[in-house]
Image: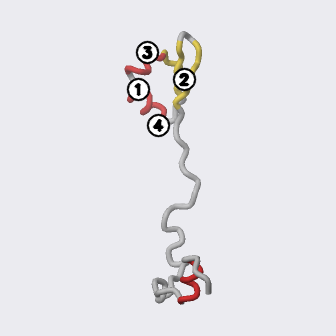
Amino acid sequence: MVTVPLGEAKNNLSKLVDEAAAGNIITIAKHGRAMAQLVPMTKPKGKRVGAMKGKLVIPDDFDAPLPDDLLDSFQGKAS
């Protein structure tokens, strides 16, 4: 872990961000007191986009007009 004074951090932010991205934890101090940390981002743990490819089926009539009674219900009209 590296501790850097605030003034130095302001002047070298890009370099410090690169160091944090490389896995180092950077502590930023103000008047000798730790105030903040730059830490590396963790990789997202969620499923990636497209993981359901081939598992969903969209019917051919997906965008067909709704029946009148159902459409009336959505529009707040009495049946």
Instruction: Identify which residue is drawn at 57% across, 21% down.
Output: 35
- The local secondary structure at tag 1 comes to helix
Circles 3 and 4: CB atoms closer than 8 Å = no
| C-alpha gap between disc 3 and disc 4 | 21 Å
Instruction: Give the x, y percent position of residue 52.
Output: 54, 72
| C-alpha gap between disc 1 and disc 2 | 12 Å
Label whose residue precedes the other's in the sequence (1 or 3): 3
Amino acid type, callout 4: Ala
Q: In the image, which disc is placed on residue 13?
A: 1
Instruction: Identify which residue is drawn at 41% across, 26% down.
Output: 13
Relative to 49, residue 61 above or below? below
Within 10 Å of disc 1 (Cα), the crowding (few <14, some 14-19, many 20+) is some
| C-alpha gap between disc 3 and disc 2 | 13 Å
| C-alpha gap between disc 1 and disc 3 | 10 Å
Dividing the picture into quadrants, the one containing residue 31 is: top right
> Residue beneath label 4, please?
21
> Residue beneath label 3, please?
7
- The local secondary structure at tag 2 comes to strand
| C-alpha gap between disc 4 and disc 1 | 12 Å
Relative to 16, residue 52 above or below? below
Label whose residue precedes the other's in the sequence (3 or 4): 3
Tell us which disc is closer to us: 2 or 4.
2
> Residue beneath label 2, please?
27
Circles 1 and 2: CB atoms closer than 8 Å = no
